[in-house]
Image (cartoon, grey):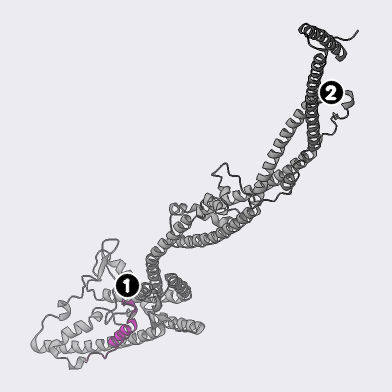
Amino acid sequence: MLAIGSPLATSLRTSSSCNVLLRELQQIWSDIGESEADKDRMLLELERECLEVYRRKVEEAANAKARLHQSVAAKEAEVATLMAALGELNIHSPIKTEKKMASLKEKLASVTPLLEDLRMKKEERMKQFADITSQIEKISGEISGYNYPSDTMISSLTLEEQDLSLRRLTEFQTHLQTLQKEKSDRLHKVLEYTNEVHLLCGVLGLDFSQTVSDVHPSLQRTNQEQSTNISNGTFEGLEKTISKLKTERKIRIQKLRDTVSALFELWNLMDTPQADKNVFSRAISVLRLSEAEVTEPGVLSIEMIEQASAEVERLTKLKASRMKELVMKRRLELEEICRMIHIEPDASTAAEKSNALIDSGLVDPSELLANIEAQITKAKDEALSRKEIMDRIDRWLSACEEENWLEDYNQDNNRYNAGRGAHINLKRAEKARITVTKIPAMVDNLINRTLAWEEEKKMLFLYDGVRLVSILEDYKLTRKQREEEKRRCRDQKKIQDLLLTEREAIYGSKPSPRKTNSFRKPNGYRANGNGSMTPTPRRSSVGGGTPELLTPRSYSGRQNGYFKEMRRLSTAPLNFVAISKEDTVSTYTSVCGSELGSPPHS
């Protein structure tokens, strides 16, 4: 049996229907009365019309077949192209299955899903390539500094757009990973550089943002969309900036150290309290640190250095006045030492001259102070070398004081009265007489010691600007003259006593001047321990035994004053013979009063 849907069955049904219709048409024509010729003509026309319809349908079918074939071929070609671009060569080709497929529609239905799948894969692959190339372009731009990047991978992708294979994608991914690794290394290096710049800017007190922005704006990171420039130019700029900052740090460290060193000198000189020093503890810390260890923020800032410099300037100004006071203080100390050892201080550092030099700015007060310090040291050394002689001088002067006291004691008419303390003064007088007898030996020994000292030191031994040997020689001469004057006074006294006796015999007796004249001196005693009055030592007088050394004199003109006194002491004695008799009593009272009532001296 024929299948109902088969072409042969369809043809049989069509032929049967056509025969039925043809018989019906011929019957109609017969009824109408058409001739056989007309019937043949109309049947021929009917056949032509049927053939035209079949021909038209065949052409339409042929065109549809051609379109289907073209579509299938185009899709197969696109599939082949996509497979080649994607590198998927293992997929079964529709050409291999063509023999198994009967129609073009089946081929088209088979290739269409494959084509759609390949198109989707291509689109996804293109997205992957676009993403990778975008990253490569971005990283390449960051590395090159966006200076017209010429990445070979991107160039090859532009030239070979059909190569979208996994192999090519893997190459791009590998290249991207390489660039990412290089970017990571460069970012790490940039981070190290920026951290170092940040540290240096902090130490120097500079604006970090402005500093890195001068190298490249992207380093400031104010715009998150802008990627950090990690090009070689950025590295070079950061390296130059770091080198510049390190140089500046070195300069400032040295400047701060010099300033702090000056502060230490001024602090030590001015005795600055610790509280004032603590203000600059941060600056002081720089002294004990190496250059690399100076990391405290702001410790090398301009403000810190200016603050320390301002303190140096302030203390320097204060130092000028304080140094002047210190110079004067040390000069007074020098003068005191010289006064104690009776030598002349150096006139070059006298108070008036030092003041003038400091005010004029011709001499550094520190140098002047050092000069005075050296003079003080020298004076102390000289005091040690003069100590033995100075001790002997003190003993000699003490003996002279005792001699003066003894003379005052001998002038007292009541010295033998049985009063309170009289026995003490009597004992002292006995000791004083023994001491006075040793004075010439003291003077001779002192002269010999002084001459030996001068021979050893190869210089004169000066006492208040006058040679000590000359003073002692003058003292010996003056003492000798005084002793001679005392002897003459005693001789004249004997003559006067004879004259008084003769006058009393002629004119009658009258009170003796010796009994009416009192030699007690109201200021010649001092209270002793038991309430009695003890004679006090006094300075040298015409008849006294104390030399000119006891008379206080200023340093200027000391030598002239000394020789003036020596000339006064060495004047010729009074011419007692020429004195009138009426004035003899008062004359002898004033000149020889020291001998009245005292035992005669040999």
Disc 2: CA contacts within 10 A as few (<14), some (14-19) or many (>=20): few
Asked if residue 98 shows in the view, the reply is: yes
Residue 563, magenta (yes or no): yes
Q: Amino acid at mark 2?
A: Ser
Side of 373 where 198 appears, left or right: right
Side of 263 where 60 appears, left or right: right
How far apart marks 2 and 1 lie (CA) works out to 171 Å
**Where residue 426 appears, x then y in whole percent?**
30, 70
Residue farthest toward the right in the current orientation of the protein: 1
Q: Amino acid at mark 1?
A: Ala
Residue at x 86%, y 30% (from the top left corner): 95
| 429 over 174 or under it: above or below | below
Q: Nearer the viewer, residue 534 or 118?
A: 118
Q: Can you tell which of label 2 and label 1 is closer to the viewer?
A: 2
Q: Quadrant of the N terminus?
A: top right
Is label 2 in a helix, a strand or a loop? loop
Residue farthest toward the bottom in the current orientation of the protein: 578
Residue at x 65%, y 48% (from the top left corner): 141
* First to last magenta residue range: 549-574
**Where residue 482 appears, x then y in whole percent?**
30, 85
Side of 449 where 479 appears, left or right: left
Is label 1 in a helix, a strand or a loop? helix
Q: Nearer the viewer, residue 482 or 316?
A: 316
**Where residue 372 appears, x then y in whole percent?**
43, 72
Q: Nearer the viewer, residue 200 or 368?
A: 200
- Image quadrant where residue 240 sits: bottom right
| 139 over 600 or under it: above or below | above
Report the residue marked by disc 2.
103
Q: Looking at the rendered structure, which numbered label has been put on residue 462?
A: none
Q: Looking at the rendered structure, which numbered label has been put on residue 429?
A: 1
How many marks are shown on the rendered structure? 2
| 144 over 162 or under it: above or below | below
